[in-house]
Image (spheres, rainbow, N blue to C red):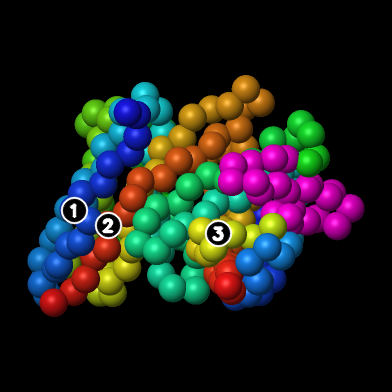
Amino acid sequence: DGGITQSPKYLFRKEGQNVTLSCEQNLNHDAMYWYRQDPGQGLRLIYYSQIVNDFQKGDIAEGYSVSREKKESFPLTVTSAQKNPTAFYLCASSITGSRGQETQYFGPGTRLLVL
Amino acid sequence: AQSVTQLGSHVSVSEGALVLLRCNYSSSVPPYLFWYVQYPNQGLQLLLKYTSAATLVKGINGFEAEFKKSETSFHLTKPSAHMSDAAEYFCAVSDGTYKYIFGTGTRLKVLA
């Protein structure tokens, strides 16, 4: 089945530690995204990538880093510079529709907690 | 600039009653509009999308939404609520590119 997978489902971070969240898709989508979700705030864009080896900062990129070495994979690293990392992280990918619009599809999410 | 407002962070309906979740948007260009549903501790699932074709859009699980340009609205409806509809619903607007603006969500509770 085609889809987007995220791992792990839960992740615990210690103070000063970098952690990496995995996102893989087999939908052959060109673009991929990372969002952060906090209660009552909707989704906020961290980074997105339209093609391999290229990515752009979103609205809240500080304290995060990404790479896009393969079309299928878009890992997110939460660095020690991110002082409030506790949140639900969602990965998405998108396809261009017949009218030229991008439609985003989401993975199941990773919940990051700080010890 | 684009923005989305979802009126009502919590909505309760009785099982079998009409579901109406409100979404108003602001956009300086013709918008593309989306509704997503999120069950607890899960990702977002696309319910339906408006892409400038028909103004009445039918989605999955019996939901539909109507694009009203004069009211800048894209409200989500379902004629008869089911217990399984209890979830959080997000409206999003896009100019067609990679940039989506999401609303803050409406949590739907279905009462037996």
Inter-mark Cα distance, 1 to 2: 6 Å
Q: Are marks 1 and 2 in contact (CB under 8 Å)?
A: yes
In this view of the protein, which residue sits in the foreground, A56 or B46? B46
Residue A55, relative to residue B92: is it above or below? above
Q: Which mark is residue B97?
A: none
Callout 2: residue from which chain? A
Residue B108, relative to residue B33: is it above or below? below
User: Of helix, strand and loop, which one carries label 1?
Assistant: loop
Q: Residue at x 76, y 31 (%)?
A: B53
Is residue B75 magenta-colored? yes
Q: Residue at x 27, y 57 (%)?
A: A110
- The lab-note entry on whether marks 2 and 3 share a chain reads no
Is residue B34 among what the camera can see?
no
Disc 1: which residue: A8
Q: Quadrant of the N terminus of chain B?
A: bottom right
Q: Position of residue A2 (x, y in %)?
A: 34, 29
Q: Position of residue B4 (x, y in %)?
A: 66, 60
In this view of the protein, which residue sits in the foreground, A16 or A8? A8
Magenta-drawn segment: B57-79
Q: Quadrant of the C terminus of chain B?
A: bottom right
User: Of helix, strand and loop, which one carries label 3?
Assistant: helix
Q: Which mark is residue A110?
A: 2
Amino acid type assigned to the residue bearing label 2 in the image: Thr
User: Of helix, strand and loop, which one carries label 2?
Assistant: strand
